[in-house]
Amino acid sequence: MAQETLKILYVDELRDLLDAENQLIKAIPKMAEASSSAELRSSFEHHLEQTKNHAKRLEQILRVLGEEPKGKKCKGMQGIVAEGGEMLDEDFEGALMDSGIISAAQRVEHYEIAAYGCVREYAQLLGETEAVSLLEQTLDEEKETDKKLTELARTINREAAGKARSARA
């Protein structure tokens, strides 16, 4: 009984993640386009391709479980994406806009890292070894993206701070 209940939760969370990834497939190009840093834009373009693969992996896992590969509205990601969209509507430019975009993107990554960590553990407990491997691969890519965003932020935030200081002078 407990195993069946965990499986229901697992499938529910996989569907939630699938919808989250599909929301990001639409949102990432907007973040890339708004980026003034070529390196940040390139990072988003790379992550968009990874995100498409993340969605495919989730669909594959759902099919193996005998479930229809469809998403369930992820309200958490919907809120994070909406906040990111508000950032893009701000009147910021250059490095300051890039800093805001990085902040929004890291919220996304942290949400995904938490969610993928949970579903990977559910898969482990349910003995879904192929799913564990696929989810671990996605989790590693999400962590790597977060690390890359942190590295970019170190440079871009300094540039934004310098411009802010010179604008006050």
Image (spheres, grey):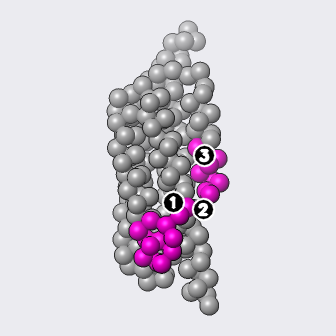
Residue at 47% over, 47% down = 25
Residue at 47% over, 21% down = 94
Q: Which of the pair 153/33 is nearer the observer?
A: 33
**Type of the residue with mark 3:** Ile
Membership of 68 in magenta stretch? yes
Badge 2: residue crowd in 10 Å (few <14, some 14–19, many ≥20): some
**Type of the residue with mark 1:** Leu
Secondary structure at numbered mark 2? loop
Report x, y in % for residue 151.
38, 40
The CA span between labels 2 and 1 is: 7 Å
In the rendered structure, find residue 128 and report the number of the disc placed on it. none
Residue at 36% over, 71% down = 133
Residue 129 showing in the rendered view: yes
Q: Are marks 2 and 3 in contact (CB under 8 Å)?
A: no
Mark 1, residue position: 18
First reached walking from the N terminus: tag 2 or tag 1: 1
Report x, y in % for residue 100.
54, 32
Mark 2, residue position: 72
In the rendered image, the residue lying farthest to the front is 68
Secondary structure at numbered mark 1? helix
> Vertically, is 124 above or below 99?
below
First reached walking from the N terminus: tag 2 or tag 3: 2
Residue 117 showing in the rendered view: no
First reached walking from the N terminus: tag 1 or tag 3: 1
Q: Which residues are magenta?
A: 59-81
Q: How many marks?
A: 3
Q: Is 148 on the left-hand or right-hand side of 119?
A: left
Report x, y in % for residue 27.
51, 41
In the rendered structure, find residue 80 and report the number of the disc placed on it. 3
Q: Are marks 2 and 1 in contact (CB under 8 Å)?
A: yes
